[in-house]
Amino acid sequence: MVHSHSRRTFLTLTGALAAVPLLGAPGAAAAAPGLDDPAKKEIAMKLVSSAENSTLDWKSQYQYIEDIGDGRGYTAGIIGFCSGTGDMLDLVQLYADREPGNVLARYLPALRAVDGTDSHAGLDPDYPRDWRRAAQDPVFQQAQNDERDRVYFNPAVRQGKADGLRTLGQFCYYDAIVMHGDGTDPTSFRNIRGRALNRARPPAQGGDETTYLHAFLDARVWAMRQEEAHSDTSRVDTAQRVFLRNGNLDLTPPLDWQVYGDSYHIG
């Protein structure tokens, strides 16, 4: 996936968000499921995969790896871990911790050295081949799942619930964190959310959910247009915004959307 270098500062936020209390009365658990409901989470993975990999088969992407020329080195795996932004290093380290001596472990020194750059030094020519080999290992697949959840999915859902958002709003947060990270630069997730809060209040602050989400998506589109690699905003315009206009705040199937002109359906 395409990310900002600031994603490395994201880990400092996850601890802070953990302290945010979830809102709602004791009976709130009986309400519609959030994005962390297994069925909804599967939908979220498919939605992101349609935008990132032009397929709903997100589990086929464990083996994906290429340099897409965005200045972030290699982009790989189910969420686009990048050799230049630190999250790939964290993933390979986790894999080495769980399965010492695996095929990627020998690249850890090189991954530390290229962090923050687009360099392939110490990775070429065999790293892509070895990544694809590792991707056949269930231990590596689980490591990808766990890092995705720790760094992106869980914090997005936690913040969405704290803001009083239902499933669609939580997904809007997740998709934004995946693409933009959550550092201090103007296009990071926290600053996209900040721009939205300047224009509308979320339900947790007494605001209208639909109005707030339109403000959030407006801010997201602005952030995407700041970088050429993100200038196609169809993942917002013809996907998330469609669900919002239809009033489908719980992401209830059937879902029909388009990304980059391709049509997708979840029944």
Image (cartoon, rainbow, N blue to C red):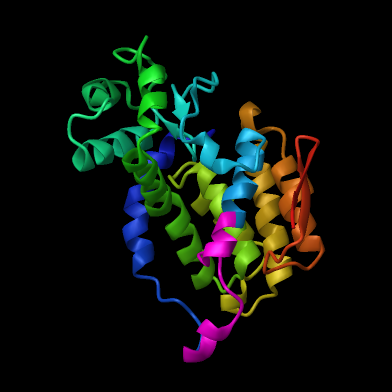
Where's residue 17, x and y in %? Answer: 38, 63
Q: How many marks?
A: 0
Whether 36 is among the magenta residues is yes
In the image, 163 versus 201, the foreground residue is 163
Please give left or right for residue 249 compared with residue 61 in the image.
Answer: right
Q: Residue at x 57, y 48 (%)?
A: 176
Q: Quadrant of the C terminus?
A: bottom right
Where's residue 205, x and y in %? Answer: 58, 77
Where's residue 179, x and y in %? Answer: 55, 41
Q: Which residue is drawn at 76% across and 61% down?
A: 254
Where's residue 75, x and y in %? Answer: 47, 28
Identify whether 97 is placed above or below 189.
above
Q: What stretch is highlighted in magenta?
A: 26-42
Q: Residue at x 38, y 21 (%)?
A: 117
In the image, 166 versus 9, the foreground residue is 166
Identify whether 197 is placed above or below 10.
below
Q: Which residue is drawn at 40% across and 32% down?
A: 135
Q: Is residue 126 in sight in this rendering? A: yes
Q: Is residue 192 in sight in this rendering? A: no
Location of residue 109 by image quarter: top left
In the image, 169 versus 255, the foreground residue is 255
Please give left or right for residue 253 compared with residue 161 in the image.
Answer: right
Whether 64 is among the magenta residues is no
Q: Which residue lies furthest to the top in this view?
A: 125
Location of residue 140 by image quarter: top left
